[in-house]
């Protein structure tokens, strides 16, 4: 093993092999084998550090077929299949030409790793697909962003099915980049409530109606997930992005933070550490937490926890259905006007003849 502090970019810092992976923030120079070791150790350390789950707990992994959730499933089965029971939840939002392909990759991975999975569809659960929903959201900015809509609906299903499948923890593939983007977005939007909720475990308060969401890739940079998947031949869907992703505000933050990370390696870790240092000052007091817990009850429609009569998902769906009705009525009015004009013309013509 080479001595720390005397790093030679041409050879791995752990052995004499040629460097295959360079991590500029260290800097670190690794051969494929030692990069894999470094990556996996950090993953296991994150689970220990944030006490994400315990042996014997049932783990439900939200699997999209993309790189993050596929790598997550691979690592969880590699290290925890003996100590924990593992299942995957695949959500089909209904995006023609994109989702089916990613879902097929997700299913293939589950079969390869011998993991049971369940596919849940927006269409069956909400009577809507993203393809139907998004044109309405895009044409009406007051409804919010496409991904905000989709994300809220997905979280509703994740929680609902985590309870149905009796999972102790729900695992998502959020990585370091996602977390840092969310942090900066919350600062830019002055969204203190959301900022306080951020964590490697979901910030949702302890309430029996919520299954804890955990993020074992919380400290793992996105680029390294891609490299790890390539080295370890973990098949994932990467050919196309969701056709509605271009509208997400998050893209701007991603671009900005990538520019900083490329120019000043380590920026993303600095932001995460800053946030970690800030956390003790952000903790909500027990009284306000208890207040929220006492105001929580079941949504009148879907039975998910909410502080109001209806949960956010059901409220959103009601709004979108109203919008759909309005558009339909407008179209019918327009068709009727056309028809009247046509009839008038026809009558005039007929009379003339
Ligand atoms: S990119 Fe946005 S709209 Fe597409 S699946 Fe993801 S959250 Fe939903
Ligand atoms: Zn090496
Ligand atoms: Zn509801």
Image (spheres, grey):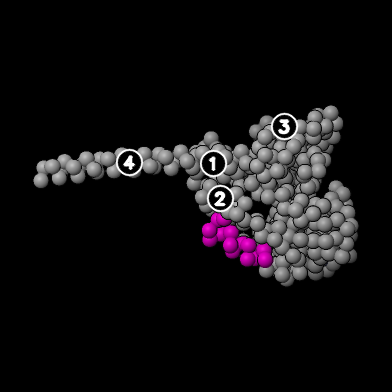
Disc 4: which residue: 336
Disc 2: which residue: 128
Tag 1 near tag 3, CB within 8 Å: no
Q: Is residue 39 above or below residue 263?
A: below
Secondary structure at numbered mark 1: helix
At label 3, counting other C-alpha atoms closer than 10 Å, the crowd grade (few under 14, some 14-19, many 20 or more) is few
At label 4, counting other C-alpha atoms closer than 10 Å, the crowd grade (few under 14, some 14-19, many 20 or more) is few
Tag 1 near tag 2, CB within 8 Å: yes
Does 139 appear in magenta? no
Disc 1: which residue: 320
Q: Nearer the observer, disc 2 or disc 4? A: 4
Which sits earlier in the primary sequence, circle 2 or circle 3?
Answer: 2
Name the side, left or right, on which 25 lies relative to 101.
Answer: right
Q: Nearer the observer, disc 1 or disc 4? A: 4
Q: Nearer the observer, disc 3 or disc 4? A: 4
Tag 1 near tag 4, CB within 8 Å: no
Secondary structure at numbered mark 2: loop
Q: Is residue 45 visible?
A: no
Residue displayed at 85% across by 52% down: 53
Residue displayed at 81% across by 36% down: 279
Q: Nearer the observer, disc 1 or disc 3? A: 1
Which sits earlier in the primary sequence, circle 1 or circle 3?
Answer: 3
Name the side, left or right, on which 20 lies relative to 84.
Answer: left
Numbered label attached to residue 192: 3
Residue 208 place in picture, x, y as percent: 81, 43
Which quadrant of the view contains residue 198? top right
- The magenta span reads 93-107
Q: CA distance from mark 2 to mark 3?
A: 32 Å
Q: CA distance from mark 1 to mark 2?
A: 10 Å
Q: Is residue 75 above or below residue 283?
A: below
Which sits earlier in the primary sequence, circle 1 or circle 2?
Answer: 2
């Amino acid at each position: 093993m080479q001595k720390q502090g005397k790093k030679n970019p041409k050879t791995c810092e752990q052995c004499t092999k040629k460097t295959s992976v360079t991590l500029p923030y260290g800097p670190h120079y690794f051969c494929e084998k030692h990069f894999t070791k470094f990556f996996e150790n950090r993953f296991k350390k994150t689970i220990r550090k944030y006490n994400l789950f315990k042996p014997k707990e049932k783990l439900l992994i939200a699997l999209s077929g993309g790189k993050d959730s596929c790598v997550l499933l691979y690592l969880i089965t590699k290290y925890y299949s003996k100590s924990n029971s593992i299942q995957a939840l695949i959500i089909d939002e209904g995006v023609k030409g994109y989702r089916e392909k990613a879902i097929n990759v997700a299913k293939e991975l589950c079969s390869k790793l011998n993991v049971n999975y369940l596919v849940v569809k927006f269409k069956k659960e909400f009577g809507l697909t993203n393809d139907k929903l998004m044109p309405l959201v895009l044409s009406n900015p007051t409804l919010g962003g496409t991904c905000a809509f989709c994300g809220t609906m997905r979280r509703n299903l994740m929680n609902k099915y985590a309870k149905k499948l009796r999972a102790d923890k729900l695992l998502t593939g959020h990585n370091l980049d996602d977390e840092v983007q969310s942090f900066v977005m919350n600062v830019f939007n002055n969204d203190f409530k959301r900022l306080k909720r951020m964590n490697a475990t979901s910030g949702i308060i302890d309430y029996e109606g919520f299954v804890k969401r955990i993020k074992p890739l919380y400290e793992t940079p996105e680029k390294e997930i891609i490299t790890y998947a390539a080295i370890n031949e973990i098949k994932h869907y990467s050919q196309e992005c969701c056709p509605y992703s271009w509208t997400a505000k998050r893209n701007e933050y991603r671009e900005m933070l990538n520019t900083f990370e490329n120019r000043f390696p380590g920026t993303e870790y600095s932001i995460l550490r800053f946030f970690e240092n800030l956390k003790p000052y952000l903790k909500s007091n027990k009284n306000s937490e208890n207040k929220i817990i006492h105001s929580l009850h079941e949504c009148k429609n879907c039975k998910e926890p909410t502080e109001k009569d209806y949960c956010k998902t059901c409220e959103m769906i009601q709004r979108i259905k109203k919008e759909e009705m309005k558009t339909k009525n407008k179209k019918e009015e327009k068709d009727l006007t056309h028809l009247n004009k046509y009839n008038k013309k026809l009558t005039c013509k007929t009379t003339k003849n």
